[in-house]
Amino acid sequence: MIHSAAKLLDVMKVPVSGDPTSAVLAVDHEQPHEAPVACDILVVGGGLGGVAAASAAARRGRRVCLLEETDWLGGQITAQGVSALDEHDHIESFGGTRTYYQLREAIRDHYRAFLEAAPAEPFNPGNCWVTRLAFEPKAGLGALNALLAPEIDSGHLRIFLRCKASAVETEGERITGLRALDLEAGRHLRFEFDYVLDATELGDLLELSNCDYTVGAESIAETSEPHAQPASAKVHCVQSCTYIFALERRATGESHVIAEPEGYAHYRESQPYSFRIHVHGGEIYGEETGWLQYQLFEDMPGTKGPLWKYRRLIEAGQFPAGHANDVTMFNWPGTDYRDRPLVDLGPEELAAALQDAKRVSLGFIHWLQTAAPNASGAPGFPELMLRRDVMGSIDGLSKYPYIRECRRIKALKTITEQDVAVAYQAGPRAAHFADSIGVGWYPIDIHQAGAGDVGVSTRTKPFQIPLGALIPERLENLIAANKNIGTTHITTAATASTRSSGISARRPARSPPGQSRAGVNRAPYMPTLSNCAPCKPTCSATACRSAGSSTCRIQAPNFRRSSASPWPPATPAKAIGSHSHPPSRCRPRHAPQFSPPSRPSAALAAMQRSAAPLSQQHWRKPV
């Protein structure tokens, strides 16, 4: 059976003004597609989750194809512009994998080349107060490309930039093929695979494949979460999105004021545009619930610093020979788009919503330049210059909006508030899962999405990501690999930052003081020979870290391989589009036992089958 989309939205082409549907493309499914591309694993979506999945599988010899609809890999830290990383306070010592730390150090090394003196460690190019590592998105892109070059050169990894899924083919409870449209050239591609990972930003494959999923805020009756909706579920309560931008602080007296965008007067009042925000105790802003008053360049009582230093990407004083002025990115409540959720909108509606979201951010820039409170007395800061080159776009906004919440699979295990929140954890960590494949630590931080949303923030303890949260109840070979895993509206606010910044490695990272190392760090990725969580309650991840460990229940994956096209290619594979490169994990046919699902699952049965050792694998066509 073929499930297809009649139209697709090219998100990068949504205009700030004019007809937003000019970015909507009709898909002619009668057009012939090119020769099928066969692979073991198809990853759809090139954010850090998809990149991590593709890289780890390719490093282990799997044939991997990665599709990304923008022209930059990296998702949240590149195309979405949030390159002042949202991480916990102890990230420098625990909570990341070896490869993730390699990525972070590669980014730092890029900037170390411009230093004239040894920096304070840990080195932060932006020296901002929200994170220990802030950088320009292009620096993150370059580091990712370099990190992934070996897999591309070996031919195990092929990357298709500016390609978007247009149809899926299913047989029973399996997805057997996927069709994609090259958004630039108009070519139709077709992929055959054993496993497909949905690493898209909005959970596109969940809708396209008719996978069971949920949207919005659940009720207390559904999840028993204390901060869930008290009366009934509200599907419109999806966290707001944001178009990110970067500004440079030029010399006083210069003027770089942008034109007033359409809808400015409306959003100036409804957002509102302000330096005063309401925060919940336990957030990154402070310990007390209430209102905080910021200023752009001045310290204010009760705050951690001025707004300019909140997510500063470049502190010019560290680079006297390379940067004349500071550069700061903005991700602020005043730039959150709350009019309507982006999920489950048709292409035309989504285009209109994204155009409005762009106007919200451009309006905030105009307000900063012309009307924001200024200690000098004159309103605004006209010297602030929009740096279009930082985001790599014509309008100066991120290529893709920063997505906080999307469709979420109905998974074998749904992570709830009780699994992660401090109120339910007696020890140093959150709930233990025998099938843990990653850890994270970030507060529940909900950006209110409209009337009736909870807008809560609550602290968590270091938590595990169970494998069951990545596996849908029904489809056998679909894996969630982004913000679409099995969480609730409440917990996705904590796990989203974890998923966006995890890149796989063979070795677990260090644990915080007082916490035993009971799982591999970071999601999303699949357990492999060296990346399983505790194989049984008494086994630590360390015990089964080595390939072929006799104590590990996870055997080598038994992939069914097809030969629709030769692989590896005769010459090293190159990305279609501009640059390429990604990382994450492949999935074995069976995994450790997890918490029993609410009902029997075909996926669970498939994962419990025995798998042949690597030496017994053979190539054959899909059934």
Image: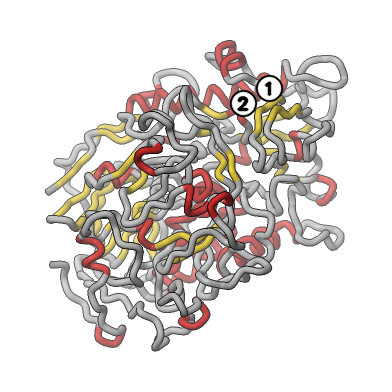
Find numbered disc 2 in the image and state the secondary structure of the residue it sits on: helix
Q: Quadrant of residue 255?
A: top right
Q: Nearer the viewer, residue 623 or 69?
A: 623
Residue at the image point whose x is 44% and y is 44% from the top: 70
Specify whether residue 399 is in view. Answer: no
Q: CA distance from mark 1 to mark 2?
A: 7 Å
Disc number for residue 473? none
Q: Is residue 13 left or right of residue 303?
A: left
- Whichever of labels 1 and 2 marks the residue nearer the N terminus, that label is 1
Q: Is residue 121 left or right of residue 441?
A: right
* Residue annotated with mark 2: 334
Image coords of residue 525 (percent x, y) = 43, 63
Q: Residues within 10 Å of mark 1 (few under 14, many from 20)?
A: many
Q: Nearer the viewer, residue 552 or 152?
A: 552
Q: Amino acid at mark 1?
A: Ser
Labelled pair 1, 2 in contact (Cβ < 8 Å)? yes
Image coords of residue 186 (percent x, y) = 29, 41
Q: Amino acid at mark 2?
A: Gly
* Residue annotated with mark 1: 274
Coloration mode = secondary structure
Q: Quadrant of the C terminus?
A: bottom left
Image coords of residue 409 (percent x, y) = 33, 48
Specify whether residue 388 is in view. Answer: yes
In the rendered picture of this protein, how many numbered marks are placed on residues?
2
Q: Quadrant of residue 299?
A: top right
Q: Is residue 276 left or right of residue 215?
A: right
Residue at the image point whose x is 37% and y is 75% from the top: 61
